[in-house]
Every structure is written in C-alpha cells, then in structure tokens.
C-alpha cells in the first residue's frame, strides 16, 4: 500500500523561497575587502540569486553544468550558493589556498564551464589560468577600474536580466547541487558531489537541537571558508531558520573576528581549532576589551579539540566550545558533542572530558566501527575504523572508480578515522588511520598524546607523528610550539605526560619549533612533519 503524501522534491529552492518569504527582512552582513560593512536582507539576496540564475542561463549554462567559485566569504558568494543550483547548475567551490597545479587539476576534472572569481583573487587565478579552459570568467568587482574585455562583470550581468522573467526550474532532488574536493594529503583531490536532497536534509539535521540548535534569533558567523564543505552548511541553515548571517571575507584574524562578534552580536560561530587558539591568545591578552555576552556557542571541527582548550575558554572567558566531527564526504556534519541527559550533573572535569569527544551522530547519520576481527563493540574503548551511513554521506567519488574500496559492499562509507564508540553511541576519534602510530604491534593514539601535551600551560600547539624505529617499528615524536616567553624541556613534558598516558606511549624525542606546517584549511600537515623527522 502506498502512502498518500505529496512527493515534494527536497531541493534548495525550497530553502530560498522560505528565506525570501518567511525571513525576508532578516539580515545578511558582509565585511568587504576594504573592511567596510555591507548589509542587505534575505529578500534582496533571493532576488539577486534569481538574477544570477537568469544571467548564467543567458551565458548558455545548462542543467548539470559546473559553475566554479574562487571567492572569500561574502554576500555575492551566498548568492551563488543559491543562484547556481536553483537553475539546475552545480556550484563548485574552489579552495583558494591550494597549489595552482592542484586547482587546475580540480577545475579540469570537474569540467567547470564558468568561473566566478573575486577581483582580489585574479592573481591566484592567473597562476593556473593557462592550464584551464572555462568558457567564461565572471569577476566580482571590488574597484571601479577597467576590466579586460574577455572577463564579465558580475554586477553588470545581474543588472542585464529581467527578474520578472524568472521561472522556477523543476529540479530532481537527486540531481547534483554542489561539489567540493577533499583536501586530502595523499593522492589527487577527490570530488564529492552533493545532491539537492543531501544538502536540504543536511540543513535540516544541522539546525536541530541535536545538531547546532539554531533559532531565528541567532546570528551566525561562519569563520570556516565558504570553499570548505559548504561552510559546514551554515549559510543554508541560516537562510532556512532566518538567522542573521555575518560573512567576514578574509578578515579572520583574532581582533577582526572579536570586533565582528561584538558589533553584530554574534551568537554562533564555527571554525577549525587553529582559529580558536589564536582567539584565546587575544582574549587572554585583552580580557576586558570585548563584550561577547551574546556569543553562546563556538563550534569547533575539522580537527581534534583538546579538553584544555574547552576548559580555558569556559573558565577564563565564559565561552562555550562545542565540538563537531565531519568530512567533505559527509556534507559535512556527522556528529556533535553535546552532553546527554543527566550528564550535566557530573563533575565539571568529567563534563569537559565528555565534550572533548567528537560526539553523537546527528539524526539520520548512523555510525559503526570496524576492527581487524569485524565490527567492534560500543564499549568506549575498543578501536576500529569509523564507518558512516546516511542521506548526506557520499556513495562514491566523482569519476574515481579507483576509490571504490572506500565504500563497503553493504553501503557504508569508510572514513579513515580510528575511533571508539561508547554505549550511548558517542564517538571518540583516536586518530586518522594514516596518523596512527604502531609501536611493537600496539596502537598509540597521536591525538591523545597531543591533547595531553596541550594541557601543559607552556604548550601552544603540538603534533605527534610516527618515526621509524628498528626495534619497535614506529615510535612517537612530538613537535611542540611553546607560548611566547615560555621555556620547557623535553623531560618536563615527559613528566607531564607520565601519569596521564601509558608508559610505553611516552615520546623519546621532542622537537621545539616556531610554528607547525598547516594545510589549506588550517589543519596540521603531519605528512610534512613525518618527512622532516624520519
Ligand atoms: P575534511 O574532509 O578536510 O573536512 O577532513 C575530514 C577529516 O578531518 C576527518 O576525517 C577527521 O580526520 C578530521 N576531523 C574533522 N572533524 C574532527 C574533529 N572534531 N576531531 C578530530 N578530527 C576531525
């Protein structure tokens, strides 16, 4: 017997219609390249997104064609987030920090037809322009100078169309809305293709109380770039819920962020741990300078969040860090670390401990972990590779038959993260498969060692990597950045670790450095450290 409900496709135009009708007056605020502020409403954004859709149509863009963006976070990028997919084309956000050869590879593999680029990034484009053949390049202007005739001016294109001519395209919910390449450290980047249905359901899941818990009254500032996994879905969540959205372009240094938080009364923000480490230093140096009383949640993801950082923010600045886990392949939100019923009655230290885990899967995401002998029990200690499944998890990479082994025969995605899962389904990442240290046949968690090192008051950043060892096959080596004016010896750090980790985990070698190499999205590049020290 069939259900008698409407089969309404889950497509991004639904979110746009909601934003332009229910939340028409809510604001989108941008900090422009020259540091001035631009403000408009979701109503105006929707009108311009439709203009963009018409303009792309006029340029010959058809359903399924890829439209790439090389842009910072700003309102016109937001217009592309909607304007590209509502016409049936596919938004392909390019990570502007990648190597030019990598960008060329990505644009060519995705067969991008149109490239929308910030004027300030034309220099970045020039470095791989010769290697790609998009049919058109559209420039988002930031100055009044002349534009070479082969380039289109974004604003002129939008001005040239008649918004009354806009007609909603009937979209198939399983068709592609967006794509993004993994920032993988090994091999060529792999394309992940998000369907309308996946992004729409992800938006719903992320907004829930078991996700990021977003209200219309919220003001969201994604520090995470809009080129990194749909800015973790936050622009779509904000538009659906009617939350004010603040986009700060390239102005993501700590004082600029803090200024924006205070001025715009930001309630939710999100970024990788590196951002918050910088922010903590600024707050520690100027504890009274900023009024952040509106800020109720700093979402941290992309890399492991140390308990000591949660504690420092909470106890020194009354700010709450919330950890989330996800991947390019998971649109990206997979788990969020919230205290479960009754856990808020436990001692403070225990609560920090729980919140430093990656968390429970959001609704519609399922998790399991596999060890050498099959699926591991949810006992909070047995380690295995995390596998996930759900309506916003990738089922394949774009045109990469060679990666089929990342997907199990029964339809789960193998994440490459080594985890334990407790009886409540709370996931704790112990390591990346490739970062695990196998010493004398046993696994050492580099993340546990790093997080424990970070709890030492002199340590600003830490990375632990495997180096070859004749006797044990691998041993951990710790690379440490100290706070300015701090001095500490390897022996003192070993003493600090001694009662917190197993004795055979203690690194023999410590290297003290000024800074750690980072990936294009701000994560520590362990592959480089392994190369240097092994
Ligand atoms: P990306 O696809 O670039 O977003 O990278 C995804 C990877 O980042 C995951 O497979 C994890 O290894 C890592 N990651 C993301 N969030 C977290 C987190 N909260 N804690 C630890 N690792 C994380």
Image (spheres, grey):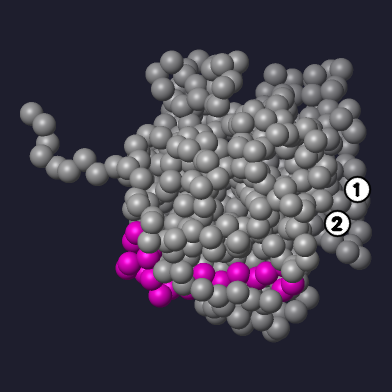
Question: What residue is rendered at 43% in x and 73% in y?
Answer: 26
Q: Is residue 354 visible?
A: no
Question: What residue is rendered at 60% in x and 62% in y?
Answer: 155
- Local packing at callout 2 (Cα closer than 10 Å; few below 14, some 14-19, many 20+) is many
**Which of the numbered marks, if any, corresponds to residue 512?**
1
Q: Position of residue 40 (x, y in %)?
A: 51, 73
Q: Position of residue 412 (x, y in %)?
A: 44, 25
Image-quadrant location for residue 38: bottom right
Side of 531 relative to 342 (left or right): right
Question: What residue is rendered at 55% in x and 30% in y?
Answer: 415
| Residue 457 sits above or below residue 474 on the image | below
SS category of the residue bearing label 2: strand
Q: Which one is in front, 83 or 494? A: 83
Image-quadrant location for residue 385: top right
Image-quadrant location for residue 271: bottom right
Q: Position of residue 534 (x, y in %)?
A: 89, 28
Q: Would residue 309 be counted in the magenta stretch?
A: no
- Local packing at callout 1 (Cα closer than 10 Å; few below 14, some 14-19, many 20+) is some
Side of 364 relative to 221 (left or right): left
Side of 222 relative to 47 (left or right): right
**Which of the numbered marks, if any, corresponds to residue 482?**
2
Cα–Cα span, label 1 and label 2: 8 Å
Asked whether the beta carbons under mark 1 and mark 2 sit within 8 Å of each other, the answer is: yes
Q: How many marks?
A: 2
Which stretch is magenta? 17-35
Q: Would residue 31 be counted in the magenta stretch?
A: yes
Question: What residue is rendered at 12% in x and 36% in y?
Answer: 3
SS category of the residue bearing label 1: strand
Q: Which one is in front, 499 or 17? A: 17
Q: Position of residue 36 (x, y in %)?
A: 69, 76
């Amino acid at each position: 017997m069939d259900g008698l409900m409407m089969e309404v496709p889950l497509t991004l135009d639904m979110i746009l219609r909601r934003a332009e009708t229910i939340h028409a007056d809510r604001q989108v605020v941008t900090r422009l390249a020259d540091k001035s502020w631009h403000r408009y409403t979701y109503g105006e954004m929707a009108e311009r997104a439709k203009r963009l859709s018409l303009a792309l149509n006029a340029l010959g863009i058809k359903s399924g064609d890829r439209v790439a963006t090389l842009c910072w976070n700003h309102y016109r990028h937001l217009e592309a987030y909607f304007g590209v997919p509502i016409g049936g084309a596919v938004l392909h956000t390019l990570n502007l920090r990648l190597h030019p050869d990598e960008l060329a590879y990505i644009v060519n593999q995705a067969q991008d037809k149109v490239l929308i680029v910030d004027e300030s990034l034309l220099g970045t484009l020039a470095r791989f322009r010769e290697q790609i053949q998009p049919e058109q390049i559209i420039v988002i202007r930031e100055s009044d100078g002349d534009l070479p005739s082969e380039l289109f001016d974004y604003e002129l294109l939008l001005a040239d169309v008649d918004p009354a001519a806009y007609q909603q395209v009937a979209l198939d919910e399983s068709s592609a809305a967006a794509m993004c390449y993994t920032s993988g450290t090994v091999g060529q980047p792999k394309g992940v293709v998000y369907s309308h249905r996946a992004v729409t359901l992800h938006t719903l899941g992320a907004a829930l109380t078991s996700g990021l818990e977003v209200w219309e009254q919220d003001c969201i500032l994604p520090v995470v770039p809009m080129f990194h996994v749909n800015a973790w879905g936050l622009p779509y969540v904000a538009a659906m819920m009617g939350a004010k959205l603040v986009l700060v372009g390239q102005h993501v240094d700590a004082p600029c962020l803090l200024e924006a938080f205070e001025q715009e009364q930001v309630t939710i923000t999100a970024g990788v741990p590196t951002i918050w480490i910088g922010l903590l230093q600024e707050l520690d140096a100027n504890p009274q300078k900023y009024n952040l009383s509106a800020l109720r949640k700093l979402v941290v993801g992309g890399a492991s969040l140390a308990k000591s950082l949660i504690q420092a923010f909470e106890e020194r600045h009354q700010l709450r860090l919330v950890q989330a886990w996800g991947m390019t392949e998971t649109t990206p939100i997979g788990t969020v670390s919230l205290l479960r019923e009754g856990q808020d009655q436990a001692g403070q230290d225990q609560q920090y401990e729980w919140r430093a885990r990656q968390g429970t899967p959001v609704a519609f995401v399922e998790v399991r972990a596999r060890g050498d002998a099959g699926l591991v029990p949810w006992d909070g200690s047995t380690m295995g590779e995390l596998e996930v499944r759900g309506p916003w998890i990738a089922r394949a990479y774009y045109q990469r038959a060679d990666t089929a082994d990342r997907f199990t025969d029964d339809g789960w995605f193998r994440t490459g993260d080594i985890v334990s899962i407790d009886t409540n389904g709370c996931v704790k990442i112990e390591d990346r498969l490739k970062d695990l240290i196998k010493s004398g046949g046993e696994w050492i968690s580099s993340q546990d060692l790093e997080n424990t090192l970070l709890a030492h008051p002199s340590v600003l950043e830490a990375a632990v990597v495997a180096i070859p060892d004749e006797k044990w096959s691998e041993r951990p080596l710790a690379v440490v950045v100290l706070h300015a004016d701090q001095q500490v010896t390897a022996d003192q750090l070993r003493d600090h670790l001694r009662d917190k980790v197993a004795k055979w985990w203690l690194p023999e070698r410590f290297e003290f450095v000024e800074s750690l190499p980072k990936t294009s999205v701000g994560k520590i590049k362990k592959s480089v450290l392994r190369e240097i020290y092994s």
